[in-house]
Image: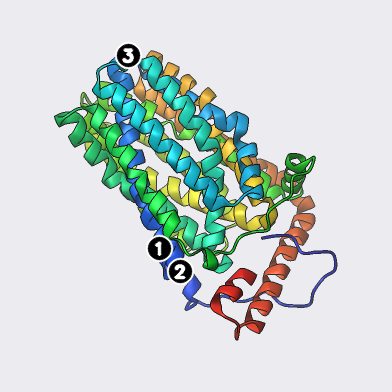
């Protein structure tokens, strides 16, 4: 949360009992607006997974190269590297719901165009590259905005649970999206998967229109002024636990999450399968990922130490999966990898949002997402090259080994800077004190209408 203003308070931090409804696995679903929002996103996410499977397989069919899949990923995430913090700044300045309605509409137009090109037989790999780049520009604005919009949909006490549930829904749609994509690709063609994705964007648009704006809890909109990006960087620098989390997330995103590159190659070369086997890999990852997100949703206050351990565990499991001797062992390793990966991602995402000031969240999450996916233009082609030259198993092993080394390095730095910990503890204490103040204010406003009380939260 936001750092308390100068001056200490004698209030004690609120205690959370085991019966606190805020710790329920599905607590955020009690909020009507969140239910509407998640329903719309589930439709969009299903289409996104269909698009991902179809796009990866189309590039592989057009070029026969795992490196080309890596280039497509690089083009899709390059705009986040260049524009991520600017996208987050837009989220701080303008109404987030309006931004999301615009981005979803543009995504529908892009998906429709790719569908027409593919169905007409005119598609070339250059078209897919251009689509990936344009979709990446939209993503640079859409993703930071979606990350922080959840803060306006649910009260603060449900934020961590809402982020975890959102991640669980996103991963659960992997169970449907790849399956539908595999059926469409195998029966009537890849182009229809793109067309279905274009239709799926109606889900979030309808959901955003149905949301009750009076029940939203918008953060104060930031006025345009010089130095806003620099002030966000200073805000992060004053909170080492936030900075190290973003660094670790960046390494995991750059190297650990190149699944389209390594899993297409593992399906095609190592296990001699096709699009159906690649789809199965994504389904197994989804099952584990959904479970991992739900586990993270029950974790009330994860510390940096736990995030570092989770990042290292994800890397170790991926290294083990790379050298699985048989397909059943590989599938089991993928499921475990999904659990650890999404537990790490959900805890890191919610922790960073709760560790920074509300009026900084857009820019901070822009940097977070820049770190998370901005390294993909470098990591994906590199992993694609390693996979193409040394084989899928070596490529996947490298994907896991680098996060392990990064987690070990951060752990060593944490141990080395332990004498400086009192300053960080003061920052954390200020955050706890402000949470206590907000809790007292909420209790004092208990007689007010629910919407107003939630706004104070």
Disc 1/disc 3 C-alpha distance (Å): 42 Å
Question: Are the two marked residues, 2 and 3, in contact with CB atoms closer than 8 angstroms?
Answer: no
Q: Which mark is residue 35?
A: 1
Question: Are the two marked residues, 1 and 2, in contact with CB atoms closer than 8 angstroms?
Answer: yes
Q: Position of residue 75 (x, y in %)?
A: 48, 24
Q: Position of residue 158 (x, y in %)?
A: 52, 66
Q: Residue at the spot x=58%, y=72% of the render? A: 454
Is there any visible trace of residue 269 in the rendered image? yes
- The quarter of the image holding the C terminus is bottom right
Q: Residue at the spot x=43%, y=71% of the render? A: 30
SS state under label 1: helix
Q: Residue at the spot x=66%, y=43% of the render? A: 89
Circle 3 sits on which residue? Answer: 63
Which of the colour schemes (rainbow, by chain, secondary structure, one colour) is used? Answer: rainbow
SS state under label 2: loop
Circle 2 sits on which residue? Answer: 31
Q: Residue at the spot x=38%, y=45% of the render? A: 338
SS state under label 3: helix
């Amino acid at each position: 949360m936001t750092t308390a203003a100068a001056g200490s308070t004698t209030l004690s931090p609120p205690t959370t009992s085991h019966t606190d409804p805020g710790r329920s696995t599905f607590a955020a679903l009690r909020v009507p607006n969140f239910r509407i929002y998640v329903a719309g996103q589930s439709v969009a996410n299903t289409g996104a997974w269909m698009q991902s499977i179809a796009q990866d397989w189309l590039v592989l069919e057009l070029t026969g190269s795992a490196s080309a899949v890596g280039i497509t990923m690089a083009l899709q995430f390059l705009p986040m590297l260049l524009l991520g913090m600017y996208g987050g700044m837009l989220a701080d300045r303008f109404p987030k719901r309006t931004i999301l309605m615009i981005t979803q509409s543009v995504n529908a137009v892009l998906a429709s165009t790719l569908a027409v090109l593919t169905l007409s037989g005119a598609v070339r790999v250059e078209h897919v590259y251009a689509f990936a780049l344009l979709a990446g520009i939209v993503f640079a604005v859409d993703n930071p905005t979606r990350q922080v919009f959840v803060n306006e949909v649910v009260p603060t006490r449900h934020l961590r649970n809402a982020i975890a549930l959102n991640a669980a829904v996103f991963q659960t749609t992997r169970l449907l999206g790849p399956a539908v994509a595999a059926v469409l690709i195998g029966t009537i063609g890849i182009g229809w998967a793109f067309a279905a994705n274009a239709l799926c964007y109606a889900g979030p648009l309808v959901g955003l229109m149905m949301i009750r704006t009076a029940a939203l809890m918008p953060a104060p909109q930031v006025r345009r002024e010089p130095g806003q990006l620099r002030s966000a960087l200073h805000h992060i620098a004053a909170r080492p636990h936030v900075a190290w989390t973003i660094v670790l997330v960046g390494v995991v995103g750059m190297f650990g999450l190149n699944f389209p590159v390594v899993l297409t190659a593992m399906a095609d070369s190592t296990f001699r399968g096709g699009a159906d086997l690649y789809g199965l890999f994504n389904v197994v990852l989804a099952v584990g990922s959904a479970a991992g997100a739900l586990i993270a949703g029950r974790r009330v206050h994860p510390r940096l130490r736990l995030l570092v351990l989770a990042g290292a565990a994800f890397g170790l499991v991926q290294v083990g999966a790379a050298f699985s001797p048989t397909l059943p062992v590989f599938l089991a390793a993928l499921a475990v990898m999904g659990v650890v990966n999404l537990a790490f991602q959900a805890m890191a995402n919610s922790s960073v949002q709760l560790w920074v000031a509300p009026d900084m969240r857009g820019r901070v999450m822009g940097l977070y997402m820049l770190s998370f996916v901005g390294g993909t233009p470098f990591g994906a082609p590199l992993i694609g090259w390693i996979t193409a030259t040394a084989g899928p198993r070596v490529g996947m092993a490298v994907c896991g080994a680098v996060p392990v080394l990064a987690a070990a390095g951060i752990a060593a730095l944490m141990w080395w800077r332990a004498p400086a910990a009192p300053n960080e503890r003061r920052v954390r204490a200020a955050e706890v004190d402000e949470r206590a103040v907000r809790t007292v204010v909420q209790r004092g406003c208990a007689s007010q209408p629910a919407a107003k009380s939630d706004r104070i939260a």
